[in-house]
Amino acid sequence: MSTVESRSASTAPPATGPEVRRAPAKRPKDFDRPRFLKVYMGLFFLLLFAPIALVVLFSFNSSRSLQDFQGFSLRWYETFFETESLRDSLVASLQIALVTMLIATILGTMLAYGLVRARTRLSSSFNVLMLVPLVTPEIVAGVSALLLFTQIGLDLSLTTIILAHITFSISYVTVVVRARLASINREVEDAAMDLGATRFQTFRLVTLPALWPAVLAAGLLVFALSFDDFVLSFFTTGESPQPLPVRIWTQIRFGVRPTINAIGTFMLVVSVVTIGLALLLPRLLGRRESGLKVLLGREGA
Amino acid sequence: MTENRFASALLAPGGLWLLLLFVVPLGFLLALSFGYTDDLGEAIYSTRLDNYERLVDPDFLPVLFRSVGFALATVAICLLIGYPVAYYIAIFGGRWKAVLLALVVLPFFVNYLIRTYAWIAMLGDDGLVNGVLDSSIRFVNTPYAVIGGLVYGFLTFMILPIYASLDRMDPSLIEAGKDLYGGRWQTFRHVTLPHTMQGVLAGSVLVFLPAVGDFVAASLLGGPEEVMIGNLIQQQFQASDNWPFGAALTIAMMAFLMIFMLFYLRAAAREAREATA
């Protein structure tokens, strides 16, 4: 008994100052979290969301006022959905976003595969070609698309908007899908080929299933971006129907109107649902990874 | 079919699309920038330099300088606001990282017009703040309002790359800095900041590029004294209907921004190489 005690006493670290004993009691990350940074984050999020919260709140205001809330009502939503031209605009916006999503996702995914796997001298030029639209100010794309369409005699309509949107959405899809593709184990594809699968079968049965989360997330991202886009639509739209953001622009220029609050809130819901779906998607597909990582292209290899 | 052939075939449709609908239109724009409008207001292709000479006209030169000035101010403010946010999320985010990041990204998916309009509703001459304070403070139609609108519009582009570079950084580096008796500020200046410079530069370019070309903030939040190059371009293609001059403005802006675009593309290419290597 006494020997055990003495042995344990001898192996125990020598008792030192209070610093050593205090260390393990604290969570490691907490040791120097400055209090002011926490306050700063609170203020930051407050200012970030205050204007948006205001729009949402006043979309339910029963009066025209933007200064005091006089009671709950849905009248601005009624105005929105009962005005035929606004309803047409909503449908147009949804159509544009849907078609853009479908075509851009297909083209972008193919481009991503080509960029990662093709070994041609053209690859690096294609890579630049794909990245440049991402850093080009939208107005440049807008006016050049407008110029192209008038030069080839294409009347401005929903079609021209969609063409412009697709051009700018391909790159987003490619970037997201490519990051995913780079993290896929090539040997699985080689194994499929060894087992007699053709190149196309391997792509369809092995590569594509692994890519799905990224492809779908990128598609939803493109849907949200297209649905919200103003600048490209503004330059390539015909007379009617015009997509919602173009209508909002016209209305804001005529002054602040309460209907805008309702349209804005509705668009917000569509975007948030779309992006939320993109973020939750991997989970919905039964994978244990976060959608944010898929979208930011940084899932573990 | 070899893998190379198969992959190259998949490159074609997207590549061709971008060539036809992105590069070719820019070619049209370049060609038209040397043109002129005839007496009927019709745009004619030509080989004149008049449009470019007009850029240095005292009517337009201040607009170009103002655009760059506003964009630089936007970058600086985004950096000051965004760095601490990215820092907090990356270093102290813990299991809330994803949620905090999502919260930062979320406003970006609220339509840009609606976000700008929300500030008018808050700070306009008869907006909420003036209503609550019963005051008549002039926020809108000032340069500050335009810069504020640009900051609110593009802040996310600053936070995400800085966050990414902080996230990549080994946190023990900070601890090492502290072990070497570096104060909080010294550690930040000599360890954290140099390690995240890539993110800072990428974020700055990603904010600068759209800010220079923006016309929404200046249209809605500014007056005639806050006109930016984007507004000039938009006017040429619509109200004043002088497409050749609008084309020259656009090409000149692209040429100026090219330096920054190339910088970003090189950084992106390097990152892609590191990712696939």
Image (spheres, grey):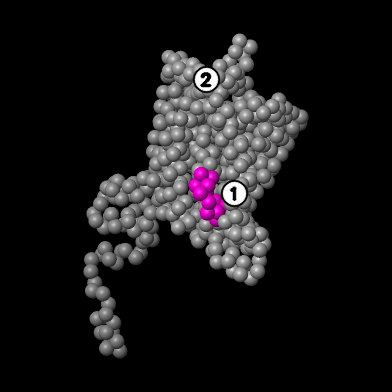
Q: What's the residue type where badge 1 is placed?
A: Leu
| Residue designated by label 2 | B47
Dot 2: within a 10 Å radius of its alpha carbon, few (fewer than 14), some, or many (20 or more) residues? few
**What's the residue type where badge 2 is placed?**
Thr
Between A48 and A298, the residue placed more toward the observer is A298
Q: Is residue A33 visible?
A: yes
Q: Which chain does the numbered disc 1 sit on?
A: B
Q: Residue at x 59, y 44 (%)?
A: B15
Which quadrant of the view contains residue B94? bottom left
| Labelled pair 2, 1 in contact (Cβ < 8 Å) | no
Residue B194 within the segment the image draws in magenta: no
Instruction: Identify whether A33 is placed above or below B152.
Output: below
Q: Residue at x 61, y 31 (%)?
A: A145
Residue B27: horizontal and vertical position, in percent?
55, 30
Q: Taking B121 as reference, is A246 left or right?
A: right
Quadrant including the N terminus of chain A: bottom left
Q: Of label 2 and label 1, which has the lower sequence position?
A: 1
**Left or right: where does residue A80 sit relative to residue B10?**
right
The alpha-carbon separation of the residues under discs 2 and 1 comes to 36 Å
Check disc 1: other Cα within 10 Å, few if <14, some if 14-19, many if 20+. Answer: many
Viewer-closest of B214 and B53: B53
Q: Position of residue A254 (x, y in %)?
A: 62, 21
Q: Which residues are magenta?
A: A111-126
Whether labels 2 and 1 share one chain:
yes
Residue behind mark 1: B11
Left or right: where does residue A41 sit relative to residue A56?
Answer: left
Q: Which residue sits furthest top?
A: B39
Residue at (62% x, 51% y) in the render: B9
Q: Position of residue A289 (x, y in %)?
A: 55, 59
